[in-house]
Image: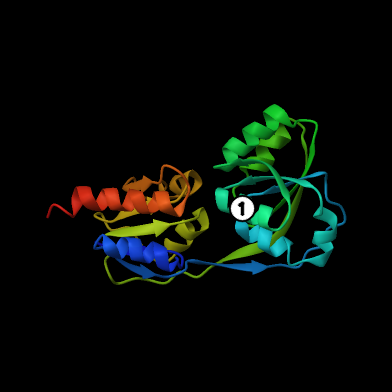
Amino acid sequence: MRLLSTKNVGKSFKNKLKQSGISLKEHPMIQIVPIQFKISQVNSALIFTSQNAVNIAFESADILRKIKGKNCFCVGEKTKALLKKKGLNVLKMCQNASDLSNFLIENYRKESFSFFCGKQRMKEIETSLDKYGIDLNIHEIYQTNFTSKHFKTYFDGILFFSPSAVSSYFTKNTWAIDTHGFCLGSTTAKRLSQFTSNFSEAKKPSENQLIITIQQYYTEYYAKE
């Protein structure tokens, strides 16, 4: 089975697939670019939904001064780990933006939040919190550029790690009828569902779970051949 990954993955990820007899080609479909921003005020609690936002926020001395000692809410285990590594206190981590929104609505309606994010994003958090009048400031600190290319080669499967990567891929490619998609999380799967129903979603948004999903598919459809 020959796969395309829409981002560069680690050596361990590639080795686990190779051990299963699966080959992998990598081509990043997106590029994260910091943008100029000015933040006059940061609310008492912080929201991060990506590692990109965490890294870029911590590159700004001005932001660092404003967020020091504040509590955080985030999406994803890796985002949580990065925030803790940076010295911030994470009160709650959820697997997706929908679950985080529901948690904040149920438990922190009187809190005020600052959401550090990219310009291209799902608007679920801000839309949900706005319905309940929860105080939320949006701080856009990066943009996502598409870096797609047209592939003449056929792939048995394509790995997607973000909705933006899905959108980028389809700017220059179509979906072959026998190609199977593998999605890291629910928002990515939702975006891919706009183009094909032929895909699987990892049970949890982690690279280990994505590998398991790929291996299970390989075992069922390729290993018996």
Can you say which quadrant of the picture contains the N terminus?
Answer: bottom left
Display coloring: rainbow
Q: Which residue is mark 1?
A: 81
Residue at the extreme top: 106
Residue drawn at (30%, 72%), measured in percent from left and top?
152
Q: Is residue 5 visible?
A: no
Residue drawn at (44%, 47%), measured in percent from left and top?
189
Foreground residue, 107 or 31? 107
Can you say which quadrant of the picture contains the C terminus?
Answer: bottom left
Q: Amino acid at mark 1?
A: Ala
On the picture, is 224 further left or further right than 38?
A: left
- Under circle 1, the secondary element is helix
Q: In which quarter of the view is residue 93 placed?
A: top right
Mark 1 Cα shell of 10 Å, populated few (<14), some (14-19), many (≥20):
some
On the picture, is 174 further left or further right than 106?
A: left
Residue at the extreme right: 40
- Percent of width and height locating residue 76: 57, 48
Residue drawn at (35%, 46%), measured in percent from left and top?
200
- Percent of width and height locating residue 140: 72, 57
- Percent of width and height locating residue 34: 68, 68
Foreground residue, 93 or 142? 93
Relative height, residue 186 to residue 13 (above, below): above
Q: In which quarter of the view is residue 176 placed?
A: bottom left
- Percent of width and height locating residue 130: 72, 36
Foreground residue, 47 or 152? 47
On the picture, is 95 further left or further right than 58?
A: left
Q: Is residue 216 visible?
A: yes
Foreground residue, 118 or 44? 44
Residue drawn at (44%, 54%), measured in percent from left and top?
207
On the picture, is 148 further left or further right than 34?
A: left
Relative height, residue 92 to residue 14 (above, below): above
Relative height, residue 9 to residue 46 (above, below): below
